[in-house]
Amino acid sequence: MVAISEGARAGLRECQRQFQHHRWSCSLASTSSSAFGHIVLVGSREAAYMYAVTSAGVTHSVTTACFRGNISTCGCDDRRRGRYSSSGWKWGGCSADIRFGVRFAKKFLDAREVEGDGRALMNLHNNRAGRRAVRSGMRTECKCHGVSGSCTVKTCWKTLPPFTFIGKHLFHKYRKAKSVSVHKAWSTASRGSKSAFPTRRAARRHRGSRRGGGSSDTRVMPFSFQQVWPGVATLQ
């Protein structure tokens, strides 16, 4: 819980830093008594960013606590330790266990989105975007070993990026956020219906959205295809 709390505060600080020159500067989030829940009531781009950066903060903080040894149930990611890469260097050191951090953040944060409505689907998508930002930002660090500074043996490990890097990455996503609407799940029975996806491209987008989570009978899709529930934005 300490790591979760630190991650939520890190997300709030990063949100305030990214929006410090904007009209909205995470003011609702900073005055809220809880870092979780519908702290931004309107389904907007700002809400999308707040959920994504909070999810990223929890993922980043839990993963950091793992490789620092602060959590007894996790530690380093040793799956590739001792193996050689195709470039000749060897995996070693303490790699950050991003898999544990992602699983824990998903289990903790996604559990509150139980309504099954459009806002919950939007929040689940943005939670996933935050976790993905941390995973995709993982870096490889190396250290040389040898006599007189020579690099006879080089060991490498995976490490987390600075959280400011993740916040900036999500801010770029925020600037390109798209409005979405709620619709019933598309099926083969509705292919000939005008209320289904109007193009094959829309169907492909739908199949991609299904991987983002949510209930089995409702999905979110770009607002331009079906105007059912406007005013919601999401990070792609």
Image (cartoon, rainbow, N blue to C red):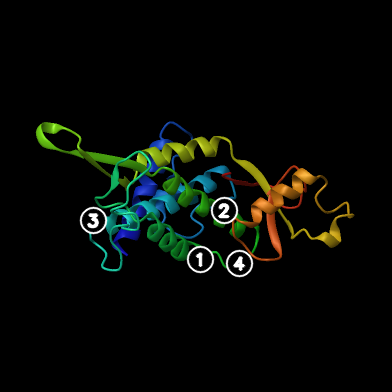
Q: Earlier in the sequence, mark 1 or mark 3?
A: 3
Q: Amino acid at mark 4?
A: Glu
Residue drawn where x is 43% and y is 31% of the image = 21
Q: Amino acid at mark 1?
A: Arg
In this view, the mark in front (3 or 4): 3
Q: Which mark is residue 115?
A: 4
Cα gap from disc 2 to disc 3, whole angstroms: 29 Å
- Residue count near mark 4 (Cα–Cα under 10 Å), binned few <14, some 14–19, many ≥20: few
x, y percentage for residue 175?
A: 55, 35
Disc 2 to disc 4: CB gap under 8 Å: no
Disc 4 to disc 1: CB gap under 8 Å: no
Residue drawn where x is 50% and y is 35% of the image = 172
Residue sitting nearer the eye, 20 or 59? 59
SS of the residue under disc 2: helix
Q: Which residue is mark 1?
A: 112
Q: Amino acid at mark 3?
A: Arg
Cα gap from disc 3 to disc 4, whole angstroms: 36 Å
SS of the residue under disc 3: loop
In this view, the mark in front (1 or 2): 2
Disc 2 to disc 3: CB gap under 8 Å: no
Give the left or right position of residue 51, taking residue 1 as reference: right
Disc 1 to disc 3: CB gap under 8 Å: no
Q: Which residue is mark 2?
A: 125
Q: Earlier in the sequence, mark 2 or mark 4?
A: 4
Residue drawn where x is 28% and y is 58% of the image = 76
Can residue 200 be seen in the rendering of this structure? yes
Residue drawn where x is 34% and y is 57% of the image = 62
Q: Amino acid at mark 2?
A: His
Cα gap from disc 2 to disc 4, whole angstroms: 14 Å
SS of the residue under disc 1: loop
